[in-house]
């Protein structure tokens, strides 16, 4: 509900319950395997290169990576 308020979105209690029940569902269309690092199996090398170009330093700054050798 805090997120909805922040976004100034009005939600009924039914909608809020539905969202909460399905946000982390293994049946979600966006759920893959739920394993750390499994994104490496999904992205092609050219996608990884582009991601490094756009956000590689940010991942280092945030502590997710120590260098661009991932």
Image (spheres, rainbow, N blue to C red):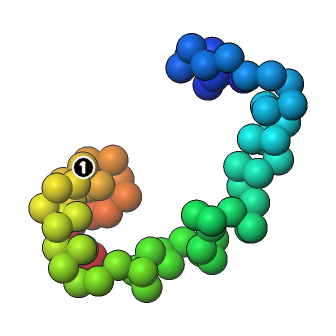
Q: Where, by quadrant of the figure, is residue 46 drawn? A: bottom left
Q: Secondary structure at mark 1?
A: helix
Q: Front-most of 41 and 36?
A: 41
Q: Viewed as shown, does residue 34 lie left or right of 26?
A: left
Q: Where, by quadrant of the figure, is residue 56 drawn? A: bottom left
Work out whether 18 lies above or below 39.
above
* Residue located at (35% from left, 53% from top): 63
Work out whether 48 lies above or below 53.
below
* Residue located at (82% from left, 47% from top): 21
Q: Viewed as shown, does residue 27 lie left or right of 7?
A: right
Q: Front-most of 17 and 70?
A: 17
| Quadrant where the C terminus is found in the figure | bottom left
Work out whether 11 lies above or below 40.
above
Q: Viewed as shown, does residue 41 lie left or right of 28?
A: left
Percent of width and height locating residue 1:
72, 23
Q: Front-most of 49 and 23?
A: 23
Q: Viewed as shown, does residue 37 lie left or right of 47?
A: right
Q: Where, by quadrant of the figure, is residue 18 drawn? A: top right
Percent of width and height locating residue 24:
72, 55
Residue designated by label 1: 58
* Residue located at (31% from left, 63% from top): 65
**Which residue occupies the extreme left position in the image?**
53
Number of numbered labels in the structure image: 1
* Residue located at (86% from left, 31% from top): 14
Work out whether 44 lies above or below 59.
below
> Callout 1: 10 Å neighbours few (<14), some, many (20+)?
few
Q: Front-most of 34 and 16?
A: 16
Percent of width and height locating residue 41:
43, 85
């Amino acid at each position: 509900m805090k997120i909805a308020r922040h976004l100034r979105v009005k939600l009924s209690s039914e909608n809020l319950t539905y969202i909460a029940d399905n946000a982390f569902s293994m049946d979600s269309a966006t759920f893959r395997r739920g394993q750390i690092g499994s994104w490496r199996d999904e992205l092609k090398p050219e996608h990884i290169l582009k991601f490094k170009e756009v956000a590689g330093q940010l991942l280092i700054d945030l502590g997710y990576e120590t260098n661009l050798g991932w």
